[in-house]
Image (spheres, helix red, strand yellow):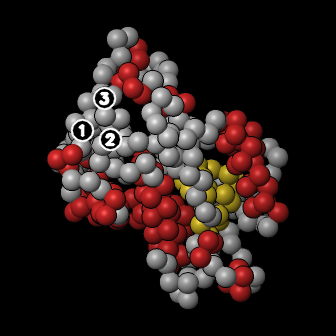
Amino acid sequence: MIDPVAAPGVILAEAAYRDIMGAQFEVAVLPWGATEPHNLHLPYGTDIVETVQIAAASARLAAEGGARVTVLPIIPFGVNTGQMDLPLTINMNPSTQLALLEDVASSIDAHSVRKLVVLNGHGGNDFKQMIREIQTKHRTYLCAVDWYRSVDRSRFFEEPGDHADEMETSLMMHIAPGLVLPLEESGKGIVKRHRIRAFREGWAWAPRPWTKVSADTGAGDPRKATAEKGSVYFAAVTRSIADFLIDLSAADPNDMYA
């Protein structure tokens, strides 16, 4: 938890009006997750838990470094059109995300916060085109960060993957161990390869119908995960994002290029 005395308003949902009424924030962070299965051993809210914790820790470090930053409550639903045959997956269409993001941006703009960062924790979300559209209507500077791209994961983990894999499992073992089932109960996260070469090589793209790709909803073997790996990775990710928030807080949106 963030100490509200040492850093009033850094976590908006935990702040009192007295903490906010005199504050002047330069950056607002909007965490965005998803609600979906994560193999057999991680909770449906994995993307939510990870992104909330990363946002909070990064903002605290940034505030300690002089950034005027506040973290907004997380949006818990993401684009999951390819997982709707998995029970209780909750899908939010991109058009809905656009409307929601525009409303948040309008509110932030009205309160004279100059920059809004969408901190994304779900691979199915993509905010680039939304930001291109919204930016033309608001003074607030908009940008997006995928926290899982903020550092090179190969420095920390042996197994490749992109869903409920060694990385996500290690991270959850560190930040929310009570929500992680024993690794003996996990699936292997084996993913079928596309029959068409261009899709395999990554220069062609189509959404993945998840149940045709993975038997356990995982993508990557989680069985080498440890809480220690998660701790080191969490520290690296939050430090990287905190440094970005410090730089962004100090930057002039009208003078971003040298």
Give the image quarter of residue 176: bottom left
Q: Give, as a three-letter code, the residue at label 1.
A: Gly
Tell me the CA gap for discs 2 and 1.
Answer: 6 Å
28 relative to 206 in the view: left or right: right
Residue 136 location in percent, x, y?
Answer: 80, 43
Of residues 159 and 154, which is closer to you in this image? 159
251 versus 79 height, above or below:
below
Tags 1 and 3 touching, CB below 8 Å: yes
Q: Give, as a three-letter code, the residue at label 2.
A: Asn
Mark found first going from the N terminus, 2 or 1:
2
* Residue at figure coordinates x 24%, y 38% from the top left: 187
Of residues 154 and 226, which is closer to you in this image? 226
Callout 2 secondary element: loop
* Residue at figure coordinates x 54%, y 76% from the top left: 63
| Crowding near the residue tagged with mark 1, few <14, some 14–19, many ≥20 C-alpha atoms within 10 Å | many
Q: Give, as a three-letter code, the residue at label 3.
A: Ala
Mark found first going from the N terminus, 2 or 3:
2
**Residue at the front extreme?**
87
Tell me the CA gap for discs 1 and 3.
Answer: 8 Å
* Residue at figure coordinates x 24%, y 61% from the top left: 227
- Is residue 134 visible in the rendered image? The answer is yes
| Crowding near the residue tagged with mark 2, few <14, some 14–19, many ≥20 C-alpha atoms within 10 Å | many
Of residues 184 and 251, which is closer to you in this image? 184
Q: What residue sits right under mark 1 in the picture?
A: 187
**Residue at the top extreme?**
196
